[in-house]
Every structure is written in C-alpha cells, then in structure tokens.
Image: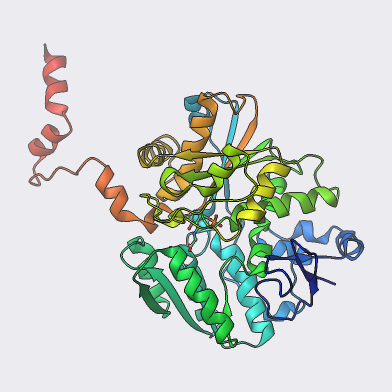
C-alpha cells in the first residue's frame, strides 16, 4: 500500500489525505511504497509487454482504480541517438529524450495524467496551478478530458505564445498575475489552503512527481535495462530532476538496473539558485528576487523543490551548471540543425550545459549521456523566428528563385 511521507521529519499521511506540506515541519512530501508488495506485483513481468508509456508502470503509481485513469497517451517519447551532435560536442554517445513528443508538448503530461487521475479519485471538482506556461497547458488539457473546472495563474506577459494558446483553447480560466512565477505560486499555495475544495497541481503535489518519475524508468527500458552514466536536465522549480532521480533509484532498489546516473541540473544564468548552491557547497538556496532569462519556462527564482533537487544531485555525485541566454539559443539552433529536433529554449539548456561541462572537463567524453529536452519548439515560435535568418520574398518566377538560391552564380561558374 502506498502512503505519503515527509522528506524531513518522516511523518506519514494516508494516500487519500489532501495535504501539500507536512503539518508537523512544513517540508515537502513524497510517495512511498511497500517494496515487498511492489516486487510481488512485478514478478510475472506482464508489465514489460505493455507499450512504453506512463501507464506501462501502473504498479509503480499510487492509483488504485485503473478505470478512473485520465490519459491522453503520455510518455513513450522518442529516445534519439544523436551521433552528429555527439561528434560536434566531442563525446562518445549521446541520446536526447525528447519530451516535446508528449500530448501537449512537454514532460508535464506525465505528471498530470497521474495528478488529475488522483483528483478524480479524490472526487474534487476543480483544479488549479501557477505556471510559467507548460504546466498550465497540460493541466488545462487533462482537466478538460476529466470534465473538471480548471484555473491557471501565469506571470503576465512572460509566457510563450504557444502555451498561452493551449491553456485558452482547452477552456481553463486564465489569470495573468502582475508579478513573476514565484509570486504566482506563492498566492496559489495560500489560495488552495484557504479553499480546500480546489485541488493544487503544482509539482509540490507528490502525485505529479510519481507520473514524472516514469521518465527515468523509460530511459532505463530504452537502454535495455541499463541506466546511462549521466542525465542532463533543465531545472526550474526543480520537481522534474527530483522525479527522474526517484525513478532511477526505485528501479535500482528493485534490481531492475545495476547502476545509477550522475544527475546534472542546468539553470539559466539569471535564475540559478540551485546551481549556485551546488557550486558553493551550500545546504540551502538563496532565492533570486528578480529571475531573468529568455527561457521563460525556467524563469524561477525560488524553486519549491530545491531540497529534493540538491539531494538528487549530491546523492548521485552529479553537478549543476549555469548557461547564458546566448548559449541556450545557440544550442537550440544547433540541435535543430544537426539533429532535426526543434525544442523550446528552456529545453535546449540541457544541450548548452552539456557543451559547457564537456569543454571544461567536468563531463568525460567516454560517458554515455542522456539529455532531456523538456518541451516542444512550437511552444515558443516567436523566439525561433526572431533568432533565425529571415525568409526572402520574391516573385513567382524561376529566375527570381534561381537568384535567391544562388543558382545563377553556380551556372556562371560552371560555364567559365
Ligand atoms: N523545461 C520546461 C520546458 C519547463 O516548462 C519547465 C518547468 C522546466 C524545464 C523545469 O522543470 O520546474 O520541474 O524543474 N515549467 C514549469 C511550468 C515551472 O509552470 O510549466 P522543473
């Protein structure tokens, strides 16, 4: 039987209690399982014949009623061997786990399928979140599928257009907050304490983390029951790196893989309290009051899951690094042009971080590396258009097009 447990004082809560922070010490909660029961449920190996997806790992999820599952076919995302990019970066083996291939275009769907299923199990009628964009898009979609009311709080003017359009078309009540994500999250936490009937689905909700941990499971299964040497992932509010680490450690404890990867978190230079804490060896973070970056998805100064993230990085002997906006946008372009993968700026920070860590010798070129790209490039078309060469406009005449393609010059050269 699964239960909720405080990561600090160990106090336990029932799986059916709506509680976001420990009532005794105020820290975050996580879901725990009876390992014996889990091992028993997995013994017949039937789960292995279910196609790769979040719900292939149903036994590892804290959901008791399979008939209530709210799914849009999340997970089972592409695991791309990137030989050209690996060569470009000077490493032996690189995979990109491309989470933009989820139903609403980001890894958030893994968490929302479980979180919204839990909401249905609990019998709540409305759900809410604060978001830099992707969480709101995902929650709005799953709430629509489940027939729940949905409200999302977003920082005014600071979310990418694709994400805004998603939250709106799925029918969520969209509230633009005058302030940044951290302020929006702060107010939504207070609101959901005051109005207990509104279920909060930010990543402090441990059921969301359970869905997102499937990212770690899938990578092991896509590597034929092996863990990579290193996992590189963008970090914002820090739920995802914590979730992926939970996935890897659970597979390891069950004997499904023999090793664990070094967890490597990448933050944008203007919003990097976790990377800062890792670099200075601090046990706590100093929040950034005015976070800034072109990667609006990770424009977060006070990550709520910082403690889980520091733990994942340190326990795994990993590291954290910062990347500038220029490095992020260069990496986005390179990934698109060398591997045909179009990801949003925040996602490209994992590639930018890998490049930096290889260059400064912190990542060995013989390591087997997996970079997670967290959201689809079409989430933020404005940035992509802004940083690319402008299209040329010509008349619909063959000579004009020959000129635009430089074909006339080639003919002239050949004729010489
Ligand atoms: N990449 C993308 C594309 C994201 O949308 C986010 C988070 C992250 C990385 C960082 O993940 O917060 O778990 O460390 N987006 C949240 C949102 C905050 O509201 O959509 P994290």
254 horizontally vs 384: left or right? right
Residue at 57% across / 37% down in the picture?
Answer: 279
Would residue 232 be seen by someone viewing this image from the given angle? no
Q: Nearer the viewer, residue 74 or 120?
A: 120
The front one of 65 and 153 is 153
Q: Nearer the viewer, residue 344 or 151?
A: 151
Q: Locate residue 113, reporting x and y percent.
A: 61, 70
Quadrant location, the C terminus: top left
| 389 lies above or below 203 | above
State which quadrant residue 230 falls in: top right
Q: Where, by quadrant of the figure, is residue 261 drawn?
A: top right
- Which x, y percent locates residue 106? 50, 59
Decide if residue 325 is on the left or right side of residue 141: left
> Quick check: can you spot residue 87?
yes
Would residue 401 be found to the left or right of residue 382 on screen?
A: left
Location of the N terminus by quadrant is bottom right
Task: Give the residue displayed 65% in from the left and 70% down from the top.
Answer: 114
Expressed as whole percent of the image width and height from the top left, the position of residue 311 reads 69, 49
Q: What is the x, y in percent for residue 7?
A: 74, 61
């Amino acid at each position: 039987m699964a239960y909720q447990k405080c990561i600090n004082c160990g106090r336990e809560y029932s799986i059916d209690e709506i509680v976001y922070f420990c009532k005794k010490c105020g820290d975050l909660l996580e879901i725990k399982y009876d390992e014996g029961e889990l091992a028993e449920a997995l013994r017949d190996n039937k789960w292995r014949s279910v196609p790769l997806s979040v719900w292939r790992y149903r036994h590892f999820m804290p959901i008791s009623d399979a008939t209530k599952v709210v799914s849009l076919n999340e997970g089972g995302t592409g695991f791309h061997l990137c030989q050209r990019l690996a060569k470009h970066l000077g490493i032996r083996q690189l995979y990109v786990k491309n989470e933009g291939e989820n139903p609403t275009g980001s890894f958030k769907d893994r968490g929302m399928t479980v979180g919204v299923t839990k909401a249905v199990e609990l019998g709540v009628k409305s759900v809410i979140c604060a978001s830099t964009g992707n969480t709101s898009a995902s929650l709005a979609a799953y709430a629509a599928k489940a027939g729940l009311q949905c409200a999302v709080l977003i920082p005014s003017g600071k979310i990418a257009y694709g994400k805004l359009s998603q939250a709106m078309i799925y029918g969520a009540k969209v509230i633009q907050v005058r302030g940044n994500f951290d302020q929006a999250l702060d107010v939504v936490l207070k609101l959901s304490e005051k109005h207990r009937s509104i279920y909060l689905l930010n990543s402090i909700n441990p059921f969301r983390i359970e869905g997102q941990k499937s990212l770690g499971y899938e990578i092991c299964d896509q590597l034929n029951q092996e863990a990579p040497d290193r996992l590189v992932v963008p970090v914002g509010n820090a739920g995802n790196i914590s979730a992926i680490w939970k996935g890897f450690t659970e597979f390891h404890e069950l004997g499904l893989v023999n090793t664990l990867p070094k967890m490597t978190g990448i933050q944008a230079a203007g919003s990097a309290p976790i990377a800062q804490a890792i670099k200075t060896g601090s046990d706590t973070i100093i929040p950034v009051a005015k976070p800034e970056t072109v990667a609006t998805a990770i424009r977060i100064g006070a990550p709520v899951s910082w403690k889980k993230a520091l733990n994942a990085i340190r326990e795994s002997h990993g590291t954290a690094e910062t990347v500038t906006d220029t490095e992020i946008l260069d990496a986005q372009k390179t990934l698109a042009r060398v591997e045909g993968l179009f990801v949003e700026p925040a996602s490209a920070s994992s590639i930018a971080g890998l490049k930096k860590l290889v260059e400064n010798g912190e990542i060995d070129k013989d390591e087997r590396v997996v970079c997670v790209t967290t959201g689809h490039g079409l989430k933020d078309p404005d940035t992509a258009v802004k940083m690319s060469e402008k299209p040329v406009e010509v008349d619909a005449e063959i000579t004009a097009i020959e000129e635009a393609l430089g074909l006339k010059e080639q003919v002239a050269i050949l004729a010489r």
